[in-house]
Amino acid sequence: MKLAAFLSLLCLTIFFASFLLTSAAELPRSYTDSDLQKYGNPADNKRKAVSGPKERAASGQQDQEKDYWCKEGTKHSSMVVQARQRVKDSEAAVAKKQEAADRKPGDKNAAKRLSDARKTLAKNQQTLALEDAALASLETRAYRKNVPPGWLKCNTEF
C-alpha cells in the first residue's frame, strides 16, 4: 500500500515537473522599457525606398514593368468591355427584329434582317470569347512571371 502511494506520488511529481518546464518554455517573450530603449522599437526603423544607384536602376526597371503590365491589362480589359457591349447591343437588335418578324410573319425582308442580326450576334459572341481568352492568357502569363495582380489593373500600390 505504501509502495503504491509512493509510486503514484512520484508519477504526479514527475508529471507536474514536466508540465511546468514545458509551459515555461512556451511562454511568449515580454520586453521591458529598458529593452525597448536599448534595442529600439521595430516600428521606428524607416528604410529608404531607394538608396543607391543599383536600387534606383532596379526601381526604374520595375516602373517600366508596372507600366507595361498596366497598359496591357487596360488594353485587354477595354477590349473585353467593348465586346460585351457589342454582344448586348446585338441581343437587343435581335429582340427588336424578332418582334418585327413576329408582327409580319410573311415578310421575307423581316426574316432576312432577323437572320442577319442573329449572324452578327453569333460573330460578336465569338469575338467576346476570343477577347476573354486573350485576357485570361495575359493573366496567366503575368502569374507565371510573378507579377502582382494589381499591376494588370493599374493598382501599383504593391
Image (cartoon, helix red, strand yellow):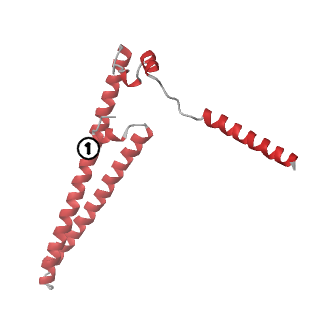
Coordinates of residue 125 in the picture (x, y in percent): 28, 62
Instruction: Tell whether 85 sits left or right of 16.
Output: left
Does 157 appear above or below 112? Answer: above
Coordinates of residue 80 in the picture (x, y in percent): 27, 52
As shown in the figure, which amino acid type bears the numbered disc 1?
Lys
Does 150 appear above or below 104? Answer: above
Instruction: Tell whether 10 sits left or right of 18.
Output: right
Please name the residue shown 15% across and 82% down the image.
102
Classify 10 Å Cα crowding around label 1: few (below 14), some (14-19), many (20 and above). few
Judge by depth and name the residue closer to the eye, 8 or 85: 8
Judge by depth and name the residue closer to the eye, 156 or 77: 156
Please name the residue shown 70% across and 37% down the image.
17
Q: How many marks?
A: 1
Please name the residue shown 25% across and 60% down the image.
124
Does 37 appear above or below 63? Answer: above
Does 102 appear above or below 53? Answer: below
Q: Residue furthest bottom?
A: 106
Residue 157: name its quadrant.
top left
Coordinates of residue 49 in the picture (x, y in percent): 33, 21
Judge by depth and name the residue closer to the eye, 11 or 62: 11
As helix, strand or loop, the secondary structure at mark 1 comes to helix
Residue 87: name its quadrant.
bottom left
Q: Which residue is mark 1?
A: 75
Please name the residue shown 36% across and 41% down the image.
149
Q: Residue furthest top?
A: 52
Q: Quadrant of the C terminus?
A: top left
Coordinates of residue 46 in the picture (x, y in percent): 35, 21
